[in-house]
Image (spheres, rainbow, N blue to C red):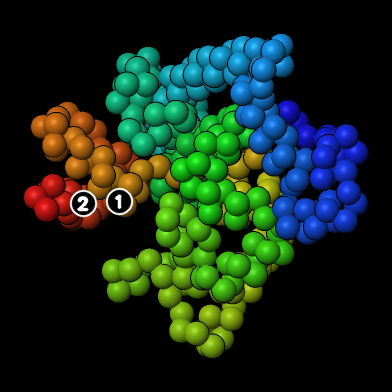
């Protein structure tokens, strides 16, 4: 499960030439292949398959319990001091229950990082938000989740497992990385109403070269250091310096299909829940109304 594969005992992979090619193409072959084998074992006959299926049932139940508890605990923190002093931090049971049942609908299987402002040494930190003020969510069970992505987003999953050099070159060529059927811009910035790569700079300019260079430098940083650069020191500490994965909260793009379903079901409570999640992620009221309008138009098509 944790890698450490015995390549010499595996068909095809016991060839040094094959393994040389695998290591050039795949960034973490031990981790990736062990995940594939772990998932395939559920189809195995006999004791091996039975043991694997029991393992996954226990694993799934444990993850649900662990994530639910973390969601409940982390949702309850609040800042009661107007100056954001650490001494003003309290835990509110009602707020915790609200987070458990009425939180971000796109993060039902993840837990929020503590969303509280802390003023320390004249600087305000928030472990639950990134540099742009977007809410952050954590999750465990990374290896198991990757298995599902090979079915739902195979290109994205394969790119994320490619060797670092392949990822670096691919990002420069595509202007970003594969993400849910499209390409998410590298060094993204909103310009002219669109999210553009390389900070919206023009190709060949000094600014464009600098933005591309920044992406290269960030891509070779260790995971813990990369998290500090992308999100800030407070969220990185809250995640145990990368002990578990972090993702941003609901985006406008992801909200539209959720709004379509809620509007189709005439579920006003769910519509309001989605709107609240967008507002929590620093979307302006005009942008939220635009998402609702787009969802309504899509339903009429």
From the top left corner, tell me how far across and down residue 239 is, in percent: 60, 36
Q: Quick one: 287 or 153, which is closer to the camera?
A: 153
Evaluate whether residue 155 shows in this view.
Answer: yes
Residue in view at x 60 percent, y 67 percent:
170
Q: Quadrant of residue 84?
A: top left
Left or right: 276 with respect to 44? Answer: left
From the top left corner, tell me how far across and down residue 148 is, in percent: 52, 36
Labels 2 and 1: the sequence-earlier one: 1
Q: Quick one: 18 or 256, which is closer to the camera?
A: 18
Name above or below for residue 52 compared with residue 149.
above
Evaluate whether residue 235 shows in this view.
Answer: no
Label 1 SS: helix
Residue in view at x 29 percent, y 69 percent:
193
Residue in view at x 36 percent, y 43 percent:
250
Residue in view at x 53 percent, y 14 percent:
61
From the top left corner, tell me how far across and down residue 224 is, in percent: 68, 46
Q: Label 1 near label 2: C-beta < 8 Å?
A: yes
The mark found on residue 28 in the picture is: none
* Badge count: 2
Q: Quadrant of the N terminus?
A: top right
Q: Quadrant of residue 25?
A: bottom right
Q: Quick one: 70 or 11, which is closer to the camera?
A: 11
Label 2 SS: helix
Q: Quick one: 139 or 239, which is closer to the camera?
A: 139
Left or right: 170 with respect to 108? Answer: right
The mark found on residue 252 in the picture is: 1
Name above or below for residue 279 compared with residue 212.
above
Q: Which residue is mark 2?
A: 291
Few, some or many residues within 10 Å of mark 2 (<14, 14–19, 20+): many
């Amino acid at each position: 499960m944790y890698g450490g594969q015995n390549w010499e005992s595996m068909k095809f992979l016991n060839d040094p030439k094959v393994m040389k090619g695998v290591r050039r193409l795949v960034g973490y072959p031990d981790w990736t292949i062990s995940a594939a084998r772990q998932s395939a074992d559920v189809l195995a006959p006999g004791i091996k398959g039975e043991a694997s299926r029991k393992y996954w049932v226990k694993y799934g139940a444990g993850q649900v319990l662990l994530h639910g508890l973390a969601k409940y605990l982390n949702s309850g923190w609040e800042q009661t001091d107007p100056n954001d002093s650490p001494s003003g931090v309290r835990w509110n049971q009602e707020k915790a229950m609200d987070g458990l049942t009425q939180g971000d609908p796109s993060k039902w299987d993840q837990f929020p990082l503590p969303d509280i402002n802390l003023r320390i040494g004249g600087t305000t930190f928030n472990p639950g938000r990134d540099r742009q003020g977007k809410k952050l969510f954590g999750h465990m069970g990374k290896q198991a989740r990757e298995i599902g992505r090979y079915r739902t987003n195979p290109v994205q999953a394969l790119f994320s497992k490619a060797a670092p050099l392949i990822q670096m070159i691919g990002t420069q060529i595509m202007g970003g990385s594969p993400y849910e059927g499209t390409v998410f811009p590298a060094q993204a910035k909103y310009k002219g109403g669109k999210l553009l790569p390389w900070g919206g700079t023009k190709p060949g300019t000094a600014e464009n070269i600098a933005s591309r260079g920044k992406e290269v430098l960030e891509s070779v940083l260790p995971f813990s250091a990369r998290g500090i650069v992308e999100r800030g020191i407070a969220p990185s500490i809250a995640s145990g310096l990368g002990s578990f994965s972090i993702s941003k909260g609901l985006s406008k793009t992801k909200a539209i299909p959720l709004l379509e379903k809620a509007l189709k079901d005439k579920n006003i409570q769910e519509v309001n829940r989605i709107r609240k999640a967008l507002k929590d992620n620093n979307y302006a009221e005009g942008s939220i109304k635009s998402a609702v309008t787009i969802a309504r138009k899509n339903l009429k098509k």
